[in-house]
Amino acid sequence: MTNTVEENIDNTLNQKTKVPVIDCDLHANPHSQNDLLPYMSDYWKNFMIDCGWRGVFQGAPAMAILQRNCLDSDTPEGGTGASSLRYFREQIADKYNYAYAVINPDATWFISASPQLEMAAAVASAYNDWQIEHWLSKDPSMLGSVVVAAQNPEEAAREIDRVGSHPQIVQVALPSFSPYGAWGNPRYYPIWEAAIRNGLIITYHVSTRGGLYRDGFEVNNFAESQTGNGIPLQVAMSSLVFSGVLEKYKELRFLFNEGGFGWVPNTMYTMDTHWPMLRREVPWVKRPPSEQVREHFWFGTQPLIEPNRPEDTKHVVDLAEMIGRDKIVYTSDYPHFTYNPPEITFKHFPKEFRENILYKNAAKLYGLPVSMEVNK
């Protein structure tokens, strides 16, 4: 059964967070897909109406649980979870002393899977204009992502240049699965260059298979899909490292979202193990892969490892320490049913490390000023 927000919160910890919170994964979405139509040209508006467009979820695998949200995240106005800025502030942001929330529209991980390149670009552009008008312009604590159709990198770069200079846009949002080839492929260079021109980080969010996402990683149910969230991110990381993207574009910074972080130390050191033996194949990789990961990558907490054995909780902190106290940021995944509130997410982390995760690391990554007394 889908949980409510309150059911996810331990009653013994149900008090307002005493430190600021920067949430790097808020899934704000339109009340309905029709809300995007005003931001499209007459051609695409008419096309969408005539074809009976039902939104970016079309073509996704038929898993009934896929779009489920926390039951009490549905807004009083009748919209789905996180379709109302006012209700999000009331239910989450004010309650947990949010300093900022970074918006990752659900469209982030579906649009790039569409084989209809021109339509995908039109939808991405509409999402960006909708996001700016309905969230960013109404609240300076809301930060935005440039949604792009990555299957057309040149058009994606133009979209980044179109809206990337907005003062509240902080990142380019990409899916974990790439539409064509691996993410280290030179075809994606225009996206990296546009992100650098506009001073934006790159966020990868776990995506759902289908359409142009053809990696051969098939699953039978949503439990398998959720468990494998980190796999495409491991592939993306090794591709970016071994393809020399980080050597060519030293300014790039990446945030991996909703794939956890427990797999990161193993991937770092596995790359280090193979690199000395295979460096003739990748002569452009000049530094140990683990060094590049620590310099260029950050990782979201969601879904946090929650061991059944209490004695194992200390090892979760150890895994995080292996990555670095400055490399993990808080991600709630609100309003999805896998939502992790800050009060329970970090109860077993040391205080200093917990504060780094809740706001200091994200403040440094995004270049944000944060006061210790956000709601006071």
Image: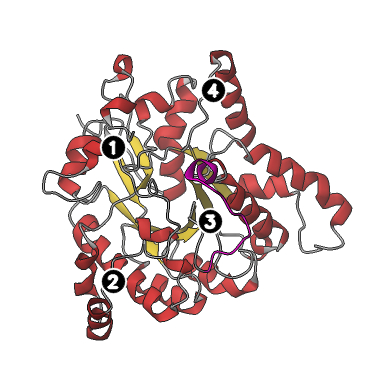
Comparing marks 4 and 2, which lies closer to the viewer? 2
Label 2 SS: loop
Query: Residue under circle 2?
Result: 53
User: Left of 121 or right of it: where is 85?
Assistant: left
Disc nearer the start of the sequence (3/4): 3
Check disc 2 and give the amino acid type. Answer: Trp
Q: Secondary structure at mark 3?
A: loop
**Overall secondary structure of the magenta stretch?**
loop
- Residue underneath mark 4: 307
Q: Are marks 3 and 4 in contact (CB under 8 Å)?
A: no
Q: Give the class, few, some or many, for how many residues have Cα within 10 Å of label 3's Cα (few <14, many ≥20).
A: many
Q: How many marks?
A: 4
Determine which residue is flagged by label 1. 98
Q: Quadrant of the C terminus?
A: top left
Splitting the image into 4 quarters, where does residue 29 fall? bottom left
- Residue at 65% x, 59% y is 240
Name the amino acid type tagged 4. Pro
Label 4 and label 2: CA atoms lie apart by 42 Å
Work out whether 305 lies above or below 225.
above
